[in-house]
Amino acid sequence: MHLLAIAFLWLESLSGVVVAIDGSDVIVDLGTESGLPPRAKVQLFRTVEVQHPRTKKRIRDQFFLHAQDVAQVGARLSIVRPPAEVLKELKVGDTVSVLMPEAATPALRPAAGKGAKTDKTDPADKAAPCTDATVRLEKARAEGFRSGYEAGRTEAPAERVPSAPAPAPIEVRHVAPRVLFRKTPAQLAFAVEGPTALRAGWVYYRTQAGADYQRVPLLPAGAGYLRASLPPELLRAHQIEYFAEATVDDESASALPLYASAQRPATVPVAESDPTVAEARARERSEVRLSYQYVDFNKLQGNDRYWVAEGDFLYRWAGIIHSLRVGAGAYDGVGGDRQQIDMNVPGASHAVGFNYGYTEIELQVAASVALLGKVLAGLTPGGLAGGFESKIRIGDERGTNLVFGGQVGPSPIGDLAMAKLTWDVIPRLPMAGTVEVTNQPAASDLGVRMLLDVGWQKYSFFRPTLTLGYAVRAVDHGGPTLGLSSVFTW
């Protein structure tokens, strides 16, 4: 009995602290060198230290959190892996004590009542009661530790500690497309309803069974909707397999299946161009465009400005030669050397003009890449003159695209370089932003023009567009741009 009490006191005094927390591993400063048994169980305590609001003294106490088996025992350090709800409560510096093994706990024998059977051969029944107060105290403390350990291992009755209600499930609605068409954007939409927020979502795809999955993110597309756009080059295959998952925004960050799975993905065939779109495009091959734009570089003083008006007709084909545009325009401007204009030197500004016709051809060199070449010829005050323009367009002609290129104009007028981004995100409101660097209208100092186009596409056959901008050559030498154009399609 005395040996058991001594062993218990030794184990009880064996305690340490949390020295590091690495992911789910809690590292403590106990090991075999300090006497930690290979199959030990430790108690984790949360240390709290506060200052008394009246006495201003520091008060420190410890609160029991959890009893946990030691996962790995080292010479000087050991690793404990408590549950996630306990792990988030622990901090470096918290106390860890070794829990006394049950084998070392003195067994307490129930009192013999009426009708109880006793084993007369048990030496313990014949032994005199221990009168050593120290041993009795240790027995009581050991029983207290054993009772606490057993209570910690026993789940509390459901009626006394009500469990938190399970969160309502997330409802996902998605209809897989029956077929995907080449040269048509491939988008997958998911309607998500539920109280749990999603941290991130992904659509995993592949073109054949057994291949590795690639993924694209699911992006918000309005309240309660997620959308993913598959890469255009993916549609060169004969079919596509995909499934969708999301990460729930909770402590576990667990994966939530949205549609299908990696083992049982959805399969969608890929066909040639959508006949519905092809038919619509066939009805929209002809186009007439009318435009007018006024550009001022010097605070509407009329000494550094120009206007241009154009009208043209375009016809589209299917194939490498995508379209042909023919039209005519008029250009009228006043300009000259900026410094002389700002110094009000007489004759610093002079008039320029150009009445011209032009032809533009577009070559579709790839699914989303086109080359455009334009030739201009006409009359200036000095006689016959001409110019040319070349541009590259990346993206859908009637959707989101990027155009960049330049123009070499008649010598009295000047040249320009430009980049234009068109986006079709807001329904019925196509927009475009343009940046131009030019020495027009009089082939003099360079200036920068920044433009915003806002269209209105309520009807497929008619699209008016308003152009607003600002043109500047220096900090104190700039002015507004205003333009209006209309496109008629049939």
Image (tube, rainbow, N blue to C red):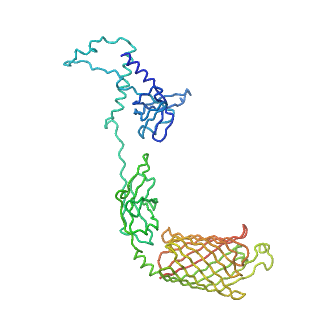
Where does the image place residue 436, in percent across and percent down from the top left?
Answer: 64, 72
Where does the image place residue 218, in percent across and percent down from the top left?
Answer: 45, 59
Depth check: 377 or 304 in front?
A: 377
Where does the image place residue 235, in percent across and percent down from the top left?
Answer: 43, 68
Furthest residue to the left? Answer: 115
Q: Which residue appears at 44% of the width and 81% of the height?
A: 282
Image: 331 above or below 194: below
Image: 269 above or below 461: above
The image quarter containing residue 243 is bottom left
Q: Which residue appears at 42% of the width and 20% of the height?
A: 9
Image: 84 above or below 117: below
State left or right for residue 350 relative to residue 236.
Answer: right
Depth check: 262 or 289 in front?
A: 262
Q: Which residue appears at 79% of the width and 80% of the height?
A: 347
State left or right for residue 128 relative to residue 207.
Answer: left
The image quarter containing residue 182 is bottom left
State left or right for residue 277 relative to residue 445.
Answer: left
Quarter of the image that includes the N terminus: top left
Depth check: 327 or 260 in front?
A: 260
Image: 348 above or below 109: below
Depth check: 455 or 85 in front?
A: 85
Where does the image place residue 470, in percent across and percent down from the top left?
Answer: 65, 70
Total numbered circles: 0
